[in-house]
Image (cartoon, rainbow, N blue to C red):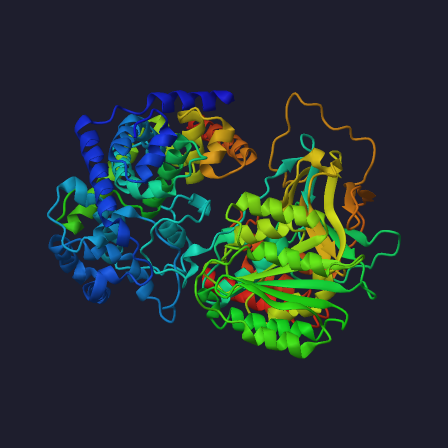
Amino acid sequence: MMTDQDEELAAAAATGDRAAFAALLSRHYDRLFAFTYRLTVNRADAEDLTQDICAALPAKLAGFRADARFTTWLYRVAVNAAHDRRRRAATRAKAADGWGDWEVNRREAIREETEAQDWLTQAMTALPDELRDTVALVLGEDLTQAQAGEVLGLSEGTVAWRMSEVKKRLRAMRAEEDAI
Amino acid sequence: MTDDLDDLKAALRAAPPAPDPSKKDADLALAMKSFDDLQGSRPDARPMSDAPKSGALGKGVIKMLNALNTRGGLAATTALVAVGFAVLVVMPNVDQVEVPGMTDMAPPPVNDTVEEEIVIQPAPEPLGKIARSPARTRSEAPADLRAQSGQVAPSVASDPMMEADISSFSDGENRIAVDDMPGILPMPPEAGGEEYANATPSPLKITSEDPVSTFSIDVDTASYAVVRRDLKSGYLPNPDAVRIEEMVNYFPYAYPAPAGAHPFAATVTTMQTPWNAGTQLVQIGIQGEMITDRPPLNLVFLIDTSGSMSDPDKLPLLKQSLRLMLSELKPEDEVAIVSYAGSAGEVLEPTKAADRATILSALDRLDAGGSTAGAQGIELAYQVAERMHDDGEVGRVLLATDGDFNVGIHDPDELKDFIADKRDTGTYLSILGFGRGNLDDATMQALAQNGNGQAAYIDTLGEARKVLVDQLSGALYPLADDVKIQVEFNPTQVAEYRLIGYETRALAREDFNNDKVDAGEIGAGHQVTAVYEVTPVGSDAVLTDALRYAPAPDAEGSDELGYLKLRYKRPGEDNSTLIETPIASANEAGTEQQFAAAIAGFGQLLREDKYLGDWTYSDAIALANGAKGADPYGYRAEAVTLMRLAESLSH
């Protein structure tokens, strides 16, 4: 079964239609990567996250409900995956041997990265996770607050509140910068 | 300073680089491989709590890893990676195994294809680096990092972050939905199929923008019993299973009885919010009148006799419950029993409660077994109810089930409509949930709401006594239907407010005056409590900034906090009656209100709501302990015990 509708493709893929799944994923891969990048503000993290999601997506599709928009659902999967990664606080290992060295190198890399941060990275990493997700959806993906709320399972009001919180924090950051 | 947001937006829009083409190809290939594996393994792709696929080897490795979970074990761990990462994906279990005395503790399900896929393949071929990394990243790295830092792996249950962590890759972050995807970790026994009706916490409202709050009352108490069951089994309940209004309404409160023409009275009080010095709690307590001389009841028990009901905490408990209840019925009340699934049909003809022997022997004949879909069980039950119906009598179908709603109507919407139709002809539906596992809380709620009845969860004989005996007249004799509450807050007094709980009961503002819109019923002797947290104008606790261009509320005028309106219909009537009363700020809260506040706080702690600041379980315990009152049945003492359990489980 081939069709142009994301939702129909997803439904077909969920029942085992290989072509539908391939079409669906290749269509949305770039958007997915862009979103994970906005969530993580880090290329390596975004790549890892995208990979995790790709690997998990076939089974996740079983949970896709045809009454939801596929993109909304995909954002939600991505946000959840990002949470998962963040909380485990683990980036992908670059090598299978020498865990000790690997950890030392990792920390070193993180430190260097932190020093070289641009304003965007600083701003995004300064925000608590839930605000970062909200920002990535509302500002990064240009979703309305209602749509972002749907992805996050929150009311529109909560999203609006979070955005006002973001504004407050950015203002505080700016004031701090100016003070230096 | 919207510039900041604009800057951030511009930066974010510009930020993402194009994906690396070779990475993209690898990802797509990985996804396709994962897809193919899933198709191939589908028939047996659901290793749940027993995870037989990991087998003895898996268990051995867990033990080994426990021993090796130290600095010295690192090399060996790494070696295992080389041997086969397949076994390592069970490592989240390590966290569990290490908790002393908590072996039956149950982390929430992890839905993770990567792990599932790998466990299913006992001997994976050496894959490319790309394909391997997810397994390593997702499972091994944290444990190894812990090992390196010499930390003991944190327990899943005692570390809220870890708990959230493990569950978070499901499709429901913040547990938006308990979905039905494959899980691999041990779960609460049989709990995989439970579905909960809940929504995000009612948001904070700004009085000047949205002064009116409208909701339907809710006399259900099922959520409290579910919470109790989980806590007593040694784990924190799923936040989605916690409905705060049902927890608050579980307890009897000594509110003043109605005196006037209306069948119930509302008491409004204000008190200092325990968890926020800058806000106040406004509590609306509604007391239904006691009926001493009720008309005869016609009760039809529609009993699920599917095979799963044979557990001791299901059908046998139901039989005991009904025996208890029988002694409370009046001789002229009538009882009939219809069973569905398994042995289907009318088990007991309508029989006067005076004829105890006949009823009891019919109960004894009830037998759980078989899985034959019951023919038209629910329609039969309503037919029997209609046959029993005489003028002025109250008919009610009580559906007792462990979650099998295969009652003869398969389409949920059709079933709801059917129940709603029957409600309009005067036969109500209540639902008694038994056992744990399949219990479909969302369906229970929906059906009971449509049937103008209660959904109760019965886990012990004590609970059966509370639901069926202590509150017999209330649970079974309706006083008023479609009871709606609307509160208009006064913007000169209240800057912000939020309703605690009632998320699944919110109504649109215009629904209040629309008698066509269904709402909750209240039974004889019922109490219903609603709690608002309000932030007075000028308080430090105001969370939102004033708008620059909106007119400031006129400081002149009334000093009332707000205005309470209640609408209800007498049973069988089509037009509603209105009760109105201003909410003065003066009424003092007593122990009843203190206790309700403690429970509201307890519920929010369990839901991990964000409004509580640094208020903790021990604060809830102190507050509840000081407000136990007479507590003749010990319900409040039990609540304090549950708070203590939750406190120790949350560490």
In the rendered image, is residue B593 in sight? no
Camera-side residue of B499 and B617: B499
**Is residue B347 found left or right of A170 in the rendered image?**
right
User: Does B98 sit above or below residue B40?
Assistant: below
Q: Position of residue B147 (x, y in %)?
A: 24, 58
Determine the image quadrant of residue B400: bottom right
Query: At 29% across and 39% down in the image, what residue appears?
Result: A53
Q: Position of residue B455 (x, y in %)?
A: 61, 57
Report x, y in % for residue B245: 63, 53
Q: In x, y percent, where is residue A20?
A: 28, 31
Side of B467 where B374 appears, left or right: left
* Residue placed furthest toward the bottom: B357
Taking the image as shown, residue A127 lies to the left or right of residue B461, namely: left
**Residue A32 visible in the current orientation:** yes
Depth check, front residue: B127 or B78: B127
B243 up-or-down from B457: above or below: above
How many numbered discs? Answer: 0
Tell which of B582 and A172 is nearer to you.
B582
**Would you place residue B42 above or below residue B322 in this image?**
above
**Along the horizontal axis of the image, is B490 left or right of B191?**
right
The residue at the point 68 percent across, 54 percent down is B428
Outermost residue to the right: B260
Quadrant (top left, top right, bottom left, bottom right) of the C terminus of chain B: bottom left
Q: Check the image and report above or below for B222 versus A68.
A: below
Q: Residue at x 45, y 65 (%)?
A: B308
